[in-house]
Structure formats: structure tokens, C-alpha cells
């Protein structure tokens, strides 16, 4: 295998026309240039340069080598310069894997204003509530609860602890009554979020006697789409288990009722995560800081 540094020096010498000028361009000594060229000619067993006291010119073999490798090195330098530009400017596509309600509530509102200011940054959300391998599937970031973070990942907190609640439209409560305990939900319609096409529902959890419990419930309406479940909630079709943040706007209207509040659990915060050895572009670094959770003062 050849020393590509020697080939780069050869190209510089030919373009500069002398060892002295090439040494200044590369910020090395003239003797280092001369030694590198002698070494290259020895390895190739071919004379590449005609040397005089005043100038340097290529032999026929040297000109043939220069004509072949100079375009290749020029392309390499161009690619490196573009990579440096990519690292120092907010450009490129950022791919994030997360549940759709997480993207809508915690990511999009903070990232969209940034995208308006940085038109060369593209954002790709892929909504998936399952635990996926973000490295294998070529995502830049994933989002999970703190307790679910893979150990080999770097996590950045992006939310406060997640308080859950059970929410129903007043029209549903008026027709079906208010459940008093989790067991009462057996006689109610629960709107269930599914993880996959086999209909595996994320089981609702309750704090009972100091520990987390779950029960067999009637998930009459199930979907992997938060938007569809929210629509069913709005139409008074059943009770939905969701985060307090996601319920905030609906509760503010006065048309919805929180039920079983004393049984609602609070979970770890959400974390944006990425591999420890992941090269971060400028845009990625800025997105991390943009999403980083700031503890409210006081």
C-alpha cells in the first residue's frame, strides 16, 4: 500500500514548481519534501521529477502519474471541504424515531420555529411506539422514558416527569357515569393505544396500595394513531389514558373530566437519546440544546 501523503506532496510539488514553494504551502521543511519525493520514486522504482538548481519538472512517467491522480485528490479535498461545511453549518436531514403524541407535544412545537430560521435543515419524524434499534434503522435520535434508555446511549432530558391521567368528555360521563375505582372501568369503554398490527394494547396502569397495578379492561376502540383516539375521546366514545400535558388544552375548555385522579401514576421524564460515538452535525447539536429540558425557576 502506498503512502498517500507522499502522493499529495508530489501533486503539490508539481503545482508549485519547486521544493521550496511546496514546503511553504504544506508548512514543512524543504528537506522533508525532498526526502518524501526520493522515497516515492524509490517505492515506484521510477523517476518522477527532473531536478535542476532552479526548477523542477515532471518526467514522462511523472506527468502520467500526475494527470491520473490529481483529479482524484481534488475530488477528495472537495468532499472533505463539504464535510467540514456540513459540520459547521446548519444543514442536512435529521431523522427522529418517537411515538406520534410525543412528536406532536414535545418535539414539533420547539423544532418548527428552528426550521423556519434554518431552511437547509430537513426533519423526518418516524412515529413508532415500539422499541427500535435506532442505529440499525439509521435514525439520528430516538425518544424514550428515562427508565427505558439503552445503557450504551447518551440521553438528554426533554420533559418533566410525566404525570398520567384518565380523561373523558362530559357527554360520555353524563351517559355512563363516573368510575370510582380502576375495577369500575370493566363496565366502561377504554380507548386503547396499540403497539403493533396484532393489536397489542399498551396496558393502563394504576397506583394502588403504593405499587403499580393493571387490570383486564374493555378496550373497545384500539388504534396505533393518537389522532384517532383523540377523535374518539372528543366524540364521547370512551375514556382515554394520556399524559397531563396532552390533556391540558382539553381540560381548559371545561368540556372534559379527569377521573380516577388518585390512581394516576407519574413516570420518568422523556429523553432524547443517541449513540455515544455518534458524529453530531451542527444542526444535530442545536436540536439537542433546543429540546433540552430546563427546570422551571422557583
Image (cartoon, rainbow, N blue to C red):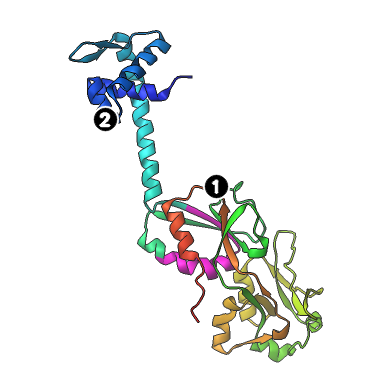
Task: Judge whether residue 227 is colored magenta.
Answer: no
Tell which of 86 and 27 is nearer to you. 27
Q: Quadrant of residue 251?
A: bottom right
Q: Position of residue 273 (x, y in %)?
A: 57, 57
Instruction: Kindly identify the residue that appears in the image at 67 percent across and 58 percent down.
Output: 130
Q: Secondary structure at mark 1?
A: loop
Does 277 appear above or below 188? Answer: above
Report which residue position mark 1 lands on. 277
Q: Residues within 10 Å of mark 1 (few under 14, many from 20)?
A: few
Residue 160: give its label.
none
Report which residue position mark 2 lands on. 25
Is 22 left or right of 123, judged from the image as shown? left
The main secondary structure of the magenta stretch is helix
Q: Position of residue 278 (x, y in %)?
A: 53, 48
Instruction: Kindly identify the residue that appears in the image at 64 percent across and 77 percent down.
Output: 163
Region in magenta? 94-113
Does 221 appear above or below 47? Answer: below
Amino acid at each position: 500500500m502506498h503512502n498517500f501523503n507522499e502522493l499529495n506532496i508530489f501533486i503539490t510539488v508539481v503545482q508549485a514548481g519547486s521544493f521550496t514553494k511546496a514546503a511553504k504551502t504544506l508548512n514543512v521543511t524543504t528537506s522533508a519534501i525532498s526526502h518524501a519525493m526520493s522515497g516515492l520514486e524509490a517505492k515506484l522504482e521510477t523517476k518522477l521529477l527532473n531536478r535542476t538548481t532552479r526548477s523542477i519538472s515532471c518526467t514522462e512517467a511523472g506527468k502520467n502519474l500526475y494527470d491520473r491522480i490529481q483529479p482524484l485528490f481534488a475530488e477528495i479535498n472537495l468532499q472533505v471541504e463539504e464535510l467540514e461545511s456540513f459540520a459547521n453549518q446548519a444543514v442536512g436531514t435529521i431523522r427522529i424515531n418517537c411515538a406520534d403524541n410525543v412528536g406532536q407535544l414535545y418535539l414539533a412545537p420547539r423544532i418548527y420555529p428552528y426550521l423556519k430560521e434554518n431552511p437547509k435543515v430537513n426533519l423526518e419524524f418516524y412515529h413508532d411506539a415500539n422499541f427500535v434499534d435506532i442505529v440499525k434503522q439509521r435514525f439520528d435520535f430516538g425518544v424514550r422514558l428515562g427508565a427505558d434508555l439503552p445503557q450504551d446511549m447518551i440521553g438528554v432530558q426533554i420533559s418533566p416527569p410525566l404525570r398520567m391521567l384518565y380523561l373523558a368528555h362530559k357527554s360520555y360521563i353524563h351517559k355512563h357515569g363516573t368510575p370510582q375505582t380502576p375495577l369500575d372501568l370493566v363496565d366502561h369503554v377504554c380507548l386503547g393505544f396499540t403497539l403493533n398490527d396484532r393489536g397489542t394494547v399498551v396496558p393502563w396502569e394504576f397506583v394502588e396500595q403504593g405499587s403499580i397495578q393493571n387490570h383486564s379492561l374493555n378496550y373497545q376502540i384500539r388504534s396505533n394513531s393518537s389522532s384517532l383516539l383523540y377523535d374518539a375521546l372528543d366524540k364521547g366514545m370512551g375514556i382515554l389514558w394520556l399524559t397531563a400535558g396532552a390533556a391540558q388544552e382539553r381540560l381548559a375548555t371545561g368540556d372534559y373530566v379527569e377521573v380516577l385522579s388518585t390512581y394516576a401514576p407519574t413516570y420518568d421524564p422523556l429523553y432524547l437519546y443517541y449513540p455515544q460515538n455518534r458524529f453530531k452535525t451542527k444542526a444535530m447539536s442545536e436540536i439537542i440544546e433546543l429540546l433540552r429540558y430546563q427546570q422551571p425557576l422557583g
